[in-house]
Image (cartoon, coloured by chain):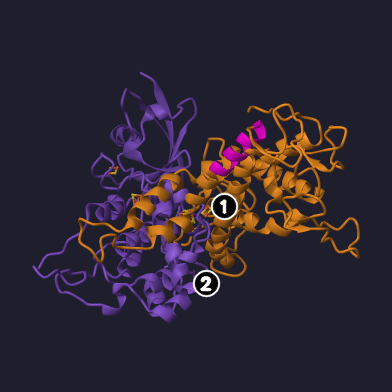
Chain colours: A orange, B purple
């Protein structure tokens, strides 16, 4: 890093430091580097997993072996990347039983049930105020870190096209709440097993049970809830938009929005931590179910 | 007694350089003490601003090893002294001499913000607020106007959007900042300190003024890309972005960008006090 000697304070309108120029001594680039690695890793894995159109639930064949081509669902799990499952020829999670992939699409063209829904959670995170900070810094170096020079001279902030579209964040938040309900329902259904503890099919019947996957799915929903409830748009909507919590009553009686705003604030204070934990948990829930569906890991039935 | 070397920027608008000085470091010492020692022993003409030595007046802002800090609140034991410690004036504002900069641009921005305009008092002639409502805006009032957040904000620091506020207020931004080679006049970004000043008024339970158009068009809140350096440097630990700028951005969206909200207002009308604006003589400028 170059030294402080570049300082030019000779005019009212100061010079701009070159990219990475700073008098800072600490390892300012470590944070952005980890952020860039973490976000890229998730993006790459997520895109790959969404492309697969397979192994989002655990299936067994008639011989009782884990087999994607099998016809029986061996555990009540569904990967969060594929929920809600818009279509699938055989999964009972599917809203439409069949294949919606247009037959004229070339085989390499990415199309899967996951691609039909992932824009919503994807854009929720893309427009999230925390992620904006994270990628503006780590991927766009605007700024790379505080008091460190930038690569570009021009700057529009979020005042112009296309970044002015970040103002749509609240709409993706509405969808995120809907997805929370859907994934919550999936997690509840993950307690309702088509097999007994030994793994024998109940011939269409179901019983209560818990597998390691159930716990992972529940944990994932909790982390996603923590992320969503701390969303700045959510916090604004439930109460932050008000100036006066006691209006139109008197000061002894605050509106319920006050409590809701405080509730959201609890999560909002650690929004970054919730963002990373829930990002990890979504990815890991898919990894877990995928590995079990591939027969590489064996799901642990706890109850 | 351990010694530390300080590289202190000496100069004025016509130019300058770093000069080396040394100071004895004793327990409990802060950077401002070292500067005072240098003034007393080696450089009586070294200019620096300070007042309280308690982190409350906001005068001693500088950049210590490249980080915007208050000199009086930076303890020497938190700084490695095996290498020289660099002390330079805040970068964003024009230099007067050595560590002293001209921050008057900030006061011009401040003047653009309409002051508190309370609603009419209750029937018994008093105003009442709930403690919870007071707590929320109280955070912003902890500001000591050290302008460290203004210094670190990349919009002002690197992109120099220190346009002439008066011209901007009049909508005739033609001025150039002093010393600029004439290009397009710089845009104006109000900066984090004034975002939270607006927040303290806009979120005030008794205030009736509407500063959202000002925020959007004159102070240009849309330029902020919420990268949070302001929050990182604030010596008063004000959550400038999370509690000030982001909530204000959401309000600007309500008012100017959200078609659903717009439709809602069209159909159901406004519920807030803004339709009964009332100026009271009690609060002077
Ligand atoms: S968050 Fe906004 S106001 Fe604060 S330093 Fe960053 S760009 Fe400037
Ligand atoms: S908000 Fe914080 S950093 Fe900015 S001027 Fe006030 S006290 Fe200083
Ligand atoms: S601000 Fe992060 S999800 Fe809304
Ligand atoms: S001297 Fe007052 S804040 Fe440092």
Q: Secondary structure at mark 1?
A: helix
Q: Is residue A212 magenta?
A: yes
Q: Nearer the viewer, residue B261 or A221?
A: A221
Provide residue B38's location: percent of width, then percent of height. 33, 34
- Tell me if mark 1 has few (under 14), some (14-19) or many (20+) residues whose alpha carbon lies within 10 angstroms of its own: some
Give the residue at the far top of this rendering. B1
Q: Nearer the viewer, mark 2 or mark 1?
A: 1
User: Residue tagged by mark 2?
Assistant: B182
Disc marking residue B170: none
The residue lying at 56 percent from left, 39 percent from top is: A28
Residue B63 lies, with reference to residue A235, above or below; the image says above
Question: What is the span of residues highlighted in magenta in the rendered image?
Answer: A211-223
Provide residue A124's location: percent of width, then percent of height. 59, 56
For the stretch drawn in magenta, the main secondary structure is helix
Do the residues at discs 2 and 1 belong to one chain?
Answer: no
Q: Secondary structure at mark 2?
A: loop
The image quadrant that residue A158 belongs to is bottom right
Q: Is residue A245 magenta?
A: no
Residue A111 lies, with reference to residue B279, above or below; the image says above
Chain ID of residue with mark 2? B
The residue lying at 22 percent from left, 56 percent from top is: B130
Residue A291 lies, with reference to residue B208, above or below; the image says above
Q: Is residue A58 left or right of residue A17?
A: right
Q: Nearer the viewer, residue B201 or A44?
A: A44
Provide residue A73's location: percent of width, then percent of height. 77, 41
Q: Is mark 2 within 8 Å of ligand 1?
A: no
Provide residue A8's location: percent of width, then percent of height. 50, 52
User: Residue tagged by mark 1?
Assistant: A181
């Amino acid at each position: 890093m170059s030294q402080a000697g570049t300082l030019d304070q000779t005019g009212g309108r100061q010079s701009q430091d070159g990219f990475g120029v700073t008098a800072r001594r600490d390892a300012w680039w470590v944070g952005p580097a980890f952020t860039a690695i973490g976000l890229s890793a998730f993006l790459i894995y997520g895109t790959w997993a969404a492309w697969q159109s397979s192994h989002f639930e655990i299936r067994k064949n008639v011989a009782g072996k884990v087999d994607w081509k099998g016809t029986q669902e061996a555990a009540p799990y569904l990967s969060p990347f594929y929920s809600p499952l818009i279509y699938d020829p055989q999964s009972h999670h599917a809203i439409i039983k069949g294949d919606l992939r247009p037959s004229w699409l070339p085989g390499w063209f990415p199309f899967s049930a996951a691609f039909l829904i992932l824009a919503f959670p994807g854009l929720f995170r893309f427009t999230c105020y925390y992620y904006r900070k994270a990628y503006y810094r780590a991927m766009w170096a605007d700024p790379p870190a505080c008091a460190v020079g930038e690569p570009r001279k021009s700057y529009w902030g979020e005042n112009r096209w296309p970044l002015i579209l970040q103002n749509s964040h609240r709409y993706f938040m509405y969808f995120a709440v809907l997805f929370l309900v859907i994934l919550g329902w999936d997690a509840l259904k993950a307690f309702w097993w088509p097999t007994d503890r030994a793994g024998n099919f109940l011939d269409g019947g179901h019983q209560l049970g818990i597998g390691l996957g159930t716990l992972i799915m529940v944990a994932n929903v909790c982390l996603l809830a923590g992320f969503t409830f701390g969303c700045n748009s959510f916090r604004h909507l439930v109460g932050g938009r008000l100036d006066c919590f006691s209006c139109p009553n008197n000061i002894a009686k605050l509106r319920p929005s006050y409590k809701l705003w405080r509730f959201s604030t609890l999560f909002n204070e650690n929004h970054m931590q919730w963002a990373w934990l829930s990002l990890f948990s979504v990815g890991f829930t898919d990894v877990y179910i995928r590995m079990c569906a591939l027969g590489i890991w064996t799901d642990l039935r706890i109850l | 007694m351990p010694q530390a070397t300080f590289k202190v920027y000496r100069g004025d608008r016509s130019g300058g350089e770093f000069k080396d000085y040394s100071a004895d470091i004793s327990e409990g010492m802060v950077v401002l003490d070292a500067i005072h020692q240098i003034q007393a022993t080696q450089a009586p003409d070294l200019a620096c601003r300070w007042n309280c030595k308690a982190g409350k007046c906001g005068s001693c802002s500088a950049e210590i090893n490249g980080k915007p800090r208050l000199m009086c609140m930076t303890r020497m034991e938190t700084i490695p002294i095996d290498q020289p410690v660099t002390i330079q004036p805040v970068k964003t504002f024009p230099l007067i001499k050595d560590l002293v900069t001209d921050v008057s641009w900030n006061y011009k921005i401040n003047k653009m913000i309409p002051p508190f305009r309370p609603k009419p008092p209750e029937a018994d002639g008093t105003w009442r607020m709930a403690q919870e409502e007071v707590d929320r805006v109280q955070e912003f009032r902890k500001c000591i106007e050290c302008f460290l957040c203004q210094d670190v904000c990349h919009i002002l620091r690197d992109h120099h959007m220190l346009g002439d506020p008066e011209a901007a207020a009049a909508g005739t931004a033609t001025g150039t900042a002093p010393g600029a080679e004439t290009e397009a006049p710089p845009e104006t970004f109000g900066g984090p300190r004034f975002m939270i000043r607006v927040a303290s008024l806009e979120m005030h339970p008794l205030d009736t003024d509407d500063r959202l158009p000002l925020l959007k068009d004159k102070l240009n809140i849309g330029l902020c890309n919420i990268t949070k350096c302001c929050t990182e440097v604030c010596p008063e630990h004000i959550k400038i972005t999370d509690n000030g700028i982001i909530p204000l951005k959401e309000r600007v969206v309500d008012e100017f960008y959200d078609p659903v909200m717009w439709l809602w207002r069209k159909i159901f009308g406004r519920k807030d006090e803004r339709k009964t604006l009332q100026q009271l003589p009690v609060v002077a400028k």
